[in-house]
Image: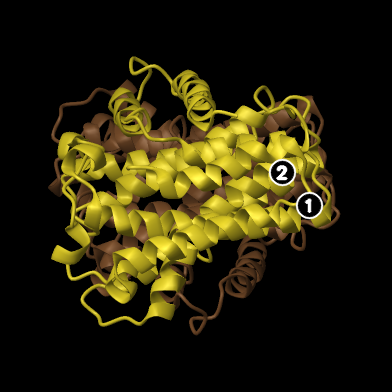
Chain colours: A yellow, B brown
Amino acid sequence: MNIKDYLEQKRVAVDRYLDQMMPPTITPPTTLHESMRYSLMAGGKRIRPILTIAAAEAVEAEPPGLMAVACSLEFIHTYSLIHDDLPSMDNDDFRRGKPTNHKIYGEAMAILAGDALLTMAFDLISRPDLMKGCDPVRQVRIIQELAYGSGNFGMVGGQVFDIQAKNIDIDLSTLQNIHRHKTGMLMRAAVRMGAIAAGVNDRQLDDMTDYAEDIGLAFQITDDVLNVTGTREELGKNPNTDAERGKKTYPTFYGVDSTKKLADKCVAQAINRLSSFGPAADPLREIARYITARKN
Amino acid sequence: MNIKDYLEQKRVAVDRYLDQMMPPTITPPTTLHESMRYSLMAGGKRIRPILTIAAAEAVEAEPPGLMAVACSLEFIHTYSLIHDDLPSMDNDDFRRGKPTNHKIYGEAMAILAGDALLTMAFDLISRPDLMKGCDPVRQVRIIQELAYGSGNFGMVGGQVFDIQAKNIDIDLSTLQNIHRHKTGMLMRAAVRMGAIAAGVNDRQLDDMTDYAEDIGLAFQITDDVLNVTGTREELGKNPNTDAERGKKTYPTFYGVDSTKKLADKCVAQAINRLSSFGPAADPLREIARYITARKN
């Protein structure tokens, strides 16, 4: 299979669905909808929704409500970027080559756009029209996965660990803890939500969870490497921001070359976790490889 | 029935449940959990969870998961207060007689505590242990009510309308629109969620929804009145803040006396909506009366 074509095709489908889900900017509250849409449609890779879709495909073709389930993760991811960029957090002026949300709409609206995107993620996966045909027992499990993965023991917890580590001489296990929560838990939720929607069995769900944890780590390690080796054009923001902020990352501990090897090891392990799955899991396997090969 | 005893008994039960739901402050991320707990346990009236409980009681004794459903509303309400108080929003230093969350924990942690409380609301009502025995079809409907009532078309939308009305000469219909969304939609969700948990029929749900809309308006009108007539001791914050900020409220349009009469009319109408319910709906009726009689 051609992973680039696969990712592109799914990205287009996700973008189209996200666009349909967002109320038009003429619908009140208009500025809120503009602000939400500005960040949601800013051209991300949509890796989390695609993971959800690929995980479902690995089990069954297309379970009802899959696009809503997949896209709920992009709502969560987008809200987290808006809030992380705020002056009181990372104070970033640019994201994906464009001014950050609060630079355009102001801090108050950026906070509210984040809150609304977060809430809308749960709206999506509980809407009767979008989720029609989904077994309600599975649906509740999917909602629970999203809540757990994005909350105080998941993504938000990771952001707390991250800001607390600022200007502090952290050790490797602290860094791992930040990554596991801040990035890992939502990618884990993405894979599990797709698998649950498709009616995975317990054994398969365990394997998929291990896969997700491995690629989550590989993803964050690669982000750290790209921050050192990438160009402004590739990244859509200035490179080397981590080092400038005195932020410890994997390359700080291992150097760039060994860090790349560590990421490759995670990917190999992730693919190994899927040995009980057939060719339907090839997209998941290729996504694992893509994660370390990407340029942004 | 004695409504004061009823409210006090339910408030204690809600407080106890909220306390149990919050991870101990020794559980990492410790500062996040401290910050969440600080605002969640700051001694609110718990009017939204109590509405949920009373709505369920009006239909049936005690449906499974009711406390989780009820308390999810207090998580949402608390997050909204933390975010509303932020410097970029209302910039309030005191809330319920105590320093606001960001005055103690800083802006970054206050934003994240809000995000985590919002997310935890959905965690609560999707957790298999807390919701055991709840029909999953009802459960998904409850989750949808919470998402819709608190999101861009509900509470967050109302907050946007509110900040956009600042320093602008708004008319009465704009004020009504702010109230209907900012306060009304979450109280509407509270009543509907309790009723749905208890297995309400469609006709009854419509009546309860009308009731909720009436008391939501009465609640906000009374808040406006108390802001003019209350004392610092009663309110736990300075009175007359609306006028000082040049904020138009019901008393601005009608004067205090006529505004009180309008609130009474809403309450009478709310009680009238419940005519098809028996004595099991008495707590709902008494809560309606209490809403205009309260001192804070």
Q: Residue at x 63, y 52 (%)?
A: A271
User: Label 2 neighbourhood size at 10 Å, few (<14), some (14-19), many (20+)?
Assistant: many
Q: CA distance from mark 2 to mark 1?
A: 9 Å
Label 1: chain?
A
Secondary structure at numbered mark 2:
helix
Q: Residue at x 67, y 53 (%)?
A: B125
Residue of label 1: A204
Instruction: Give percent across and percent down for residue B94.
Output: 26, 66
Which quadrant would residue B175 be assigned to in this image? top left
**Which labelled disc corresponds to residue B208?**
none
Q: Hey, what amino acid is under mark 2?
A: Ala
User: Label 1 neighbourhood size at 10 Å, few (<14), some (14-19), many (20+)?
Assistant: some
Q: Residue at x 23, y 50 (%)?
A: B90
Q: Is residue B23 above or below residue A140?
A: below
Q: Is residue B15 left or right of residue A227?
A: right
Share a chain, discs 2 and 1?
yes
Residue B267: in sight, yes or no? no
Instruction: Give percent across and percent down for residue B245.
Output: 15, 46
Q: Is residue A105 left or right of residue B3?
A: left
Q: Residue at x 25, y 63 (%)?
A: B107
Give the total of numbered labels. 2
| Of residues B16 and A247, the one drawn nearer to the viewer in this rendering | A247
Instruction: Give percent across and percent down for residue A92.
Output: 19, 50
Residue of label 2: A195
Which numbered mark, 2 or 1, is in the foreground of this view?
1
Instruction: Give percent across and percent down for residue B45.
Output: 51, 62
Label 2: chain?
A
Q: Which of pointers 2 and 1 lies earlier in the amino acid sequence?
A: 2
